Image (spheres, grey):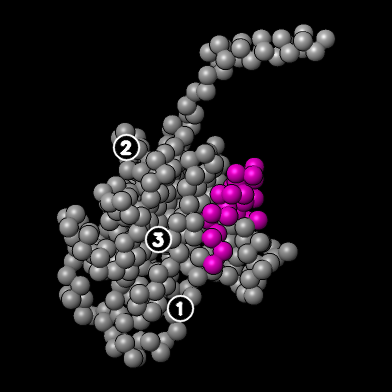
Amino acid sequence: MHSIRAALILFMSLAACASPAAIPTQQQSSPIAIATWPFGKIGTERAIEELQRGGTPIDAVEQGVRAVEKISPDRSVGLGGQPNAAGYVQLDACIMDGKTCGAGSVAGLEGIVHPISAARRVMEDTKHVMLVGEGARWFALSKGLESIDVSELPAKKQSWQVAAQKPATPTGHDTVTLLVLGKDGDLAGGCSTSGMAGKLPGRVGDSPILGAGLFVDNEVGAAGATGVGENVMRHCATFAVVERMRQGMHPQQACEATLHAIAKKDPRGYRLNLCLLALDKQGRVGAATTDEPFPYAVTAQGKSEVRTARPIAPR
Ligand code: ASP
């Protein structure tokens, strides 16, 4: 009896191996791009356009984030962003490619128009993952990236002593975090920000830190964060979201469960000023926030819209 069953199992597994249907095929999905905040829509639309032109998800992320980084005084992204306590704009960015497990990031970067491109150059042209400050600027210039002379920004300079007395404003910040799923099922993500307004010079937020402001796992999904970076970094929030998706949670559940878990142990409770965004391998979207409504952009299947996540109810 046992030998008949064993033979049957062997036959079935051989048949499964021989059958063309059993050969794993590459997943085909509809491309989708999602991003934090209404200004992220400029990025999601540019990202989808890039995919339609034949670009890879990482090309789409770079081009999408660049569109948002374009100097504009009404965003805290790029050189039009929020100055630090000494009156200088210091930028953070990172990029992650699910397909290659590649990643690059820059922090405290001054005078470079597109930090996301500097992050991509770190990923592709160096054996490192992260460059900071002067070194990051030198590297970006050596790659011919567009720059401005930082000494040409006197209007933004204030005296350190005066500015340092002002507390960093918890609301004077926003990050563009862009997550892309290409038609072959490959994921990529990137983020870029000037960080918290009035931050101490040299302060690095969550955005360039992998697993904090951004995490991409090509087998599972991608997650990004915006809000008070310190509250993201201390809890490796995006890594936690991706791990919850790996355990089978829908991206929405994964974002909410992560916020509840953080609020449960953090002395700040739900006053975290923290928003999470996630996209899984199936193209499903999740977004959750603690304190304030969180608008985010979604572009897919020829449609583009801004949706709003309401703050989660404390448990
Ligand atoms: N997370 C960013 C930072 O702390 C700011 C933001 O997204 O609002 O630098």
SS category of the residue bearing label 1: loop
Label 1, label 2: how many angstroms apart (C-alpha)? 38 Å
Q: Amino acid at mark 2?
A: Gly
Determine which residue is flagged by label 1.
169
The answer to the question of whether label 1 and label 2 lie on touching residues, with beta carbons closer than 8 A, is no
The correct choice, above or below, for 253 with respect to 204 in the image is above
- Residues packed near mark 2 inside 10 Å, few (<14), some (14 to 19) or many (20 plus): some
The disc, 3 or 2, on the residue closer to the chain's N-terminal end is 2
Label 3, label 2: how many angstroms apart (C-alpha)? 23 Å
**Residue 298 visible in the shown view:** no
Marks 3 and 1: which is nearer the front?
Answer: 3
Q: Residue at x 55, y 59 (%)?
A: 237
Q: Amino acid at mark 3?
A: Pro
Determine which residue is flagged by label 2.
55
User: What label sits on residue 208 in the rendered view?
Assistant: 3
The correct choice, above or below, for 103 with respect to 303 in the image is below
Q: Amino acid at mark 1?
A: Thr
> 228 or 24: which is nearer to us?
24
The disc, 3 or 1, on the residue closer to the chain's N-terminal end is 1
**Residue 92 visible in the shown view:** yes
Q: Residue at x 43, y 60 (%)?
A: 209
The correct choice, above or below, for 100 with respect to 237 in the image is above
Label 3, label 1: how many angstroms apart (C-alpha)? 20 Å
Image coords of residue 133 (percent x, y): 29, 69
Is 46 left, or right, of 294 in this rendering? left
